[in-house]
Image (spheres, rainbow, N blue to C red):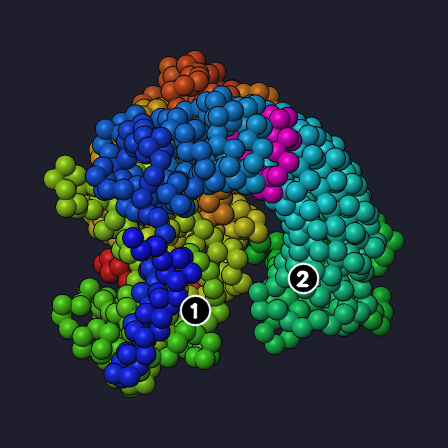
Amino acid sequence: MAAPPSPFATFFFLLLFCFSSCFQRTALGQSPPPPPPAAPSQPPLLRLVSGVELAALYSLRSSLGLRARDWPRKRDPCAAWAGVRCRAGRVVALDLTGLRRTRLGRQDPRFAVDGVQNLTRLAAFNASGFVLRGTIPDWFGALLPASLAVLDLRRCSVSGTIPYTLGNTTGLRELYLARNSLTGNVPTTLGGLSNLTTLDLSGNSLSGSIPPSLASLRNLIYLDLSSNFFTGPVPPELGTLSSLRTLRLAGNNLLASVPAQLGDLSSLVTLELGQNSLSGGIPEDLRNLRNLVELDMSNNSLSGPLPGNLFTDLRSLRSLKLSQNSFSDALPDSLWSVSEMQFLDVSYNNLSGSLPASVVNVNANSSAVFNMSHNSYYGSVPVGAASIFRRFSFVDISDNYFEGQAPAGPNLNASFDLNCFRNTSKQRSVGACTEFYAERGLTYEGSLTPSTNTTGPAGGKSNRRLKYILAGVLGGVGFLLIVAVVLICCVMRCGGGTAEQREISRDANVSGDAATSGRGNSTPGVSVNMAAIGDSFTYEQMLQATSNFSESNLIKHGHSGDLYHGILEGGIPVVVKKIDQQMPKRDSYLIELDFFGKHSQSRFVPFLGHCLEREDQKILVYKCMPNGDLSSSLFRKSGKEEESLQSLDWITRLKIAIGIAEALCYLHHECVPPLVHRDIQASSILLDDKFEVRLGSLSEICTQEGEVHQNVITRFLRKTEQGTSSLASSACAYDVYCLGKVLLELVTGNLGISGSNDTTTNEWLEKTLPYINIYEKELVMKILDPSLIVDDDLLEEVWAMAIVAKSCLNPKPSKRPLVRYILKALENPLKVVREDNSGSARLRTTSSRGSWNAALFGSWRQSSSDIASVPGPSREGITLKRSGTTGSQGSAGEQSLSHKRPSKEIFPEPSGAWLVTMLKSPMMINGEVKLSTVGREQQGREGPCRQFQRRPATGEP
């Protein structure tokens, strides 16, 4: 039997076989076989692999009542559920913003997020704008995932107190609880969140003192505790937060002085301490804030001179607000050398002295504003200080005691009223100026150059006789003027409505004539830098984008052009406006180009470019807004049978109202000179994919340059009634009136009101407004949109918006509130209808002059003789039903005050309370604003924008 081959022989034969096989393939011209293809790289895992997390998500879906459209039951959450983001098959982020509940879920929206505690790798939970009514449960802090870094519960209608257990989520880096109804104290345990970089608790009803334990947050960059009811001093310990860049404590009841330790915040960029009760002076240590850009200490009780070297090192300062305090002496010289300054407001103080002989000449800023009105500055304006008027685009030195010649120059935009200037109108009397200068041991030169007396005794007797004659004549003329003013006032009060309607008719006719002529008075003088305004498109690109401007792409025929849907190269959806140069308003596109060239603000429709190469057609291109305009989005049709008609929820409606007010606030109060929109209606309010407001219809915007179109007596009466604020309020009153009608549309769901001024609309307003009553919250339910489901929790906010809308619809334009106060009211609706029953300093009278609510409702003061009677509930025996500030916004914790108030409590004198100021108004008859002729809203057209004709809703961008 043969022996088996050895292992070495076996290996040798195998090697020989492989060599011969390779040699044979090479000889036949064949290449060796290619290597096997590499395995394709695996795509990232898009399926949820954790059964526990899947059950947690379905629990959230059920407890929150989310729609199947957003979280479909038969689809994988990581791949198809809106707002769910996964990594490696696990949920890492949850975003409820923009999601909506089913009808059943909207009936009882609760803070029911128990499923979150089982998402063990969750890093971010964002529910901003999603209603989570109720209190934050105690487990929320103790059982949240340790990986959670971002918690955003802004505008969620959360009530109650902040649980102490929230301090156990040590992994948190960002915590947002702003604009809710939280009450009570801030837990000291929040000081244990050592990783926290952002803490925002603004816009609540938190009280007590600011806990010093917040100074333990060494990584804190952003701290916002504004618009609450905090009392006590500003904790000096906050000065140890070396990384802090933003500190906002405005709108509270903070007392004592500004701590010098804040000067140690070397990284601070924004410091807001306004609208408090701070006293003392500004510490010199703040000069160490070399990175400071914005400083706000307005509306306090600060006093004393400003430190001379305070602004020496504040070279980056752009905004300084020190108004409505009691600062004295002159502004320090170091302030004039801050080259970056864009907004400087030191009005309503006790500043005195004279302007410096020379001021550093800094390049002019097109939007810079300087306001030093209502002080006691005196002397002449030196030639060297004239650069102040060139540096700032608007300067207000009114209500001081400057003498000599008023500054003059090209493009000068300044207010000199109530000074002692020579040969200038609207100045103080000679007696007042002489007395002021005599108190300081100075000589007032007078408004006229004194003449030399060279006459003898006879000449003196003749002069005395002439003086008596002149005095008699002037006295008689003055008496006749007084009688004429009284008669005109009576005529205006008794027959104002008819006269106003005649004036409206004349304005409409003038506007029609201007429109027929093709230009009007808006476009001349418009200079547009086309290179700085969007992209330049060719006409071929526009034809391709709109399919040759086909009828299928046509959206509608606008008043200034036709609107088309378009798709640019790259698939970008746009809206194209084609302006026919044969149309009456053929030059209106220049107004829009001029506006977009000078202003960049997120609240206006994004402008992409233009096509101006053809003489017969001009084309403007805007970004397409996915949700259209308010008139088409308030009620939308759905493909599902169970939800054939969808209605925007209340949180979204309030968000839209705030967005409109922000856009108008920019036009009225941030633009210099102020701008007037003139076309606020539902069709001009565009909405992006997140229902953020993008205001359109900008072709009617015009510049407000003063009340040049009003007669002298009207201006005088408004000045005496409203002071310096009458300029903006009377000029922009029409915008405010239209905003009030839009707010009513959001409350009632009655579309078409804001775009119409016909008899039907006026009759509807007359029937609707009596149901808005400051004494009875439940009355507003009778005009509430039937498709809007609200309970007692949100009813207060609806009630507040209705009250604000009614204040906007005041028959007298001069009595309507300014938009900035409307914005404050909409941002803090509960402060409109609630009273602070804790006896806090919010009701003090010492600083009520800066209270926005007093300015809002103080505008309702009007003689009852002007107002026609409208049937309403009797004031006698009426029951007040108000929610206390310590109660929750919802059913849990709501405290009702049901008692009768004596008349002196309803009409206190004086008071700075949130609502009592409104109750003082004689206009409030039977708890209602009396509206005689709704057509009086047209009074708001007074001002430089009189040539305006109302048109139907167009929905233009």
Q: Is residue 596 above or below residue 804?
A: below
Q: Are marks 2 and 1 in contact (CB under 8 Å)?
A: no
Residue at the (72%, 33%) spot, across then down: 235
Give the labeled residue for mark 1: 596
Front residue of 453 and 552: 552
Q: Badge 2, how many Cα within 10 Å: few under 14, some, many 20+?
A: many
Query: In the rendered view, does 722 fall on the left or right side of 344?
Result: left
Residue holding disc 2:
341
Magenta segment, which residues?
186-205
Considering only order in the chain, which callout, 1 or 2, is on the residue closer to the N terminus?
2
**Crowding near the residue tagged with mark 1, few <14, some 14–19, many ≥20 C-alpha atoms within 10 Å:** many
Left or right of residue 634, residue 128 in this image: right
- Considering the numbered disc 2 on the image, is that residue within a helix, a strand or a loop? loop
Residue 250 belongs to the span the image colors magenta: no
Q: Position of residue 75 (x, y in %)?
A: 24, 42
Q: Which quadrant holds residue 588? A: bottom left
How far apart are the alpha carbons under marks 2 and 1?
24 Å
Query: Label 1 sits on what residue type?
Result: Phe
